[in-house]
Image: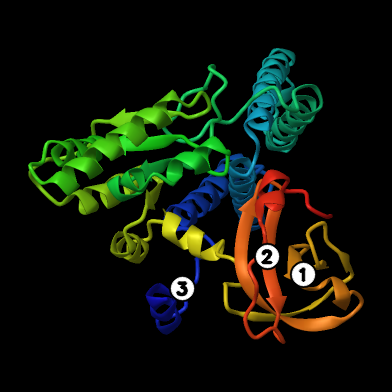
Amino acid sequence: MMIAQTSALSPVSRTPLLSVHQWLYLMLCLMLGMYAGYEHVPSQWTNAIPGIVLSGVTGLAIGCLALWIERQLTACHRSSLIGGSLGLIVALAGIGFLLIMGMETGLLQTSFLSPWITLPVFLLCPYIGLMVGIHISNTLLPTSITEFPKDSTPHTSGKPSNTVQKLLDSSAIIDGRILPLCTTGFLEGPFIVPKCILHELQMLADSAHPSKRTKGKRGLDILSQLQQLPTMDIVITEDWESDTSAVDHQLIAIAKNRDAKIVTNDWNLAKVAALQGVPSLNVNKLTYELRPLVLPGETIRVYIHKEGQGHEQGIAHLDDGTMVVVDHGASLVGQAIEVVVTRFMQTNTGRMIFSTPQSKSSPSLFNLQPFLQDSEVVS
C-alpha cells in the first residue's frame, strides 16, 4: 500500500525512444554515409551535395534498420536466435564470395557502379539469410532448445526447474506449513537456503532456552524433510556475511542479487522487502485467503433440496458447491430457510458445513460418525 501511494505521487517516468549510445550510433551512421557519398560521387557531377545527402540518408536508414533488428532479437526465442545467426553467417559468406567474384571480373572496379551494387547486396542478403534461418529453426527445432533460468544449470534428475528462485526464511521453515505446500505441489523450487538462515537455525537449536531450542530443532527437521522430497531442489548457498548486518537485511540483499522471492511468515520482513522491490510469499497471508467462507455461529440462507443420510437431516449447497448439512431439515425440503452454522469440516473431497435451522432455539447435537467414515455423504 505504501509503495502504491509513493508511485502515485511521483512524476510519471517516460522511457526515451532511444538511449544515448543509440543516438550516437545513428549520428555515426549518418556521418559515415555522407563520407562514403563524398568519396564515391562521380567526377562528372557538378554538384556533389545531392549525392552526399543521399548517401547520408542511406547510412542513417541502415543504422535505424540495425537498431530495429536489435530490438527484434531481444524478443526472439533462443532457437530462433541461433537459426537466424547461422543464416546470417551463410549470407555474409555469400556476400564475400560475390565481392571476390566482382573484383575478379572487374565489375566493382567501376566507380559509378560500385556503391549501387554493394549497397543493396549488403542490405538485402543479410536480412534474407537472417529470416530464412529463423524460419528453418522454427520449423525444424520448435521445442528442441530449452531456456534455463538465470544462474542455473539444466536439471537431469527429474526435479522441476522454475524460473523464479525462492529464499526460505527461518520463520517459514520453523512454521512447517511449507512442507505440505511442497508435498502437494502448490509450492515448487528451486529453494535457496542461505548460510545465515542455516546458522540461525543452528543457534536456536543450541540455545539454552527450551522454547528456542525446540523451534531450532523443528526448523532443522523440516529442512531435512524438504531435502528428502524427490521433487524438491534445495541449495545451501555461501553468500552471507556474518558480521556486517542482520539476517533480514542479508536475506533481502541476496534476493535482490538473485532476482528471487522470499518465503517468510515474518510480516515486518515482507513489508521491508516490498519497500525495496523484493517480492515475498507469506504463508500466513495464504492461510488467510483460504479461510472458511463461514464460521460457526454465522447465519446463512440456504435452499434444502433433498434429505440426507442421517436422521432428519436435509441437504443444501452453496453457490460454490459446498455441501450444507442441516440438522432437523428433512421436513423442510423444498424451502429456503435461515440456518446457523455449527461446524465446518474440510475433507479430501471438499468442504462440509453443518448447521441447524435458526428457528431452533438450542440446536441439538447429531452424530458425525457417518460423515467422518464416508466423506461422500450426498453429492
Q: What element carries label 3?
A: loop
The residue shown at (50%, 41%) is: 180
Q: Is residue 181 left or right of residue 127?
A: left
- Please state which of the two labelled residues, at mark 2 or mark 1, is closer to the viewer: 2
Residue receiving disc 3 = 13
Query: Which mark is on residue 353?
Result: 2
x%, y% of residue 68? Answer: 63, 49
Q: Please rate how many residues cluster around mark 2, counting C-alpha atoms within 10 Å: few if below 14, some from 14 to 19, many from 20.
A: many
Q: Tell me the quarter of the image containing the N terminus.
A: bottom left
The residue shown at (60%, 79%) is: 298
x%, y% of residue 378? Answer: 83, 55
Residue receiving disc 1 = 318
Q: Is residue 354 left or right of residue 260?
A: right
The Cα atoms of the two marked residues, 3 and 1, are separated by 47 Å
Q: Which amino acid does label 3 sit on?
A: Ser
Q: Please rate how many residues cluster around mark 1, counting C-alpha atoms within 10 Å: few if below 14, some from 14 to 19, many from 20.
A: few
Quadrant location of residue 8?
bottom left
Q: Is mark 2 on a helix, strand or loop?
A: strand
Give the mark, 3 or 2, whose residue is nearer the N terminus.
3
The Cα atoms of the two marked residues, 2 and 1, are separated by 10 Å
Labels 3 & 2 near each other (Cβ < 8 A) = no
Q: Is mark 1 on a helix, strand or loop?
A: loop
Question: Compared to 270, does 174 lie above or below?
Answer: above
Q: In this view, does 242 lie to the left or right of 356?
A: left
Q: What residue type is labelled 1?
A: Leu
Labels 2 & 1 near each other (Cβ < 8 A) = yes
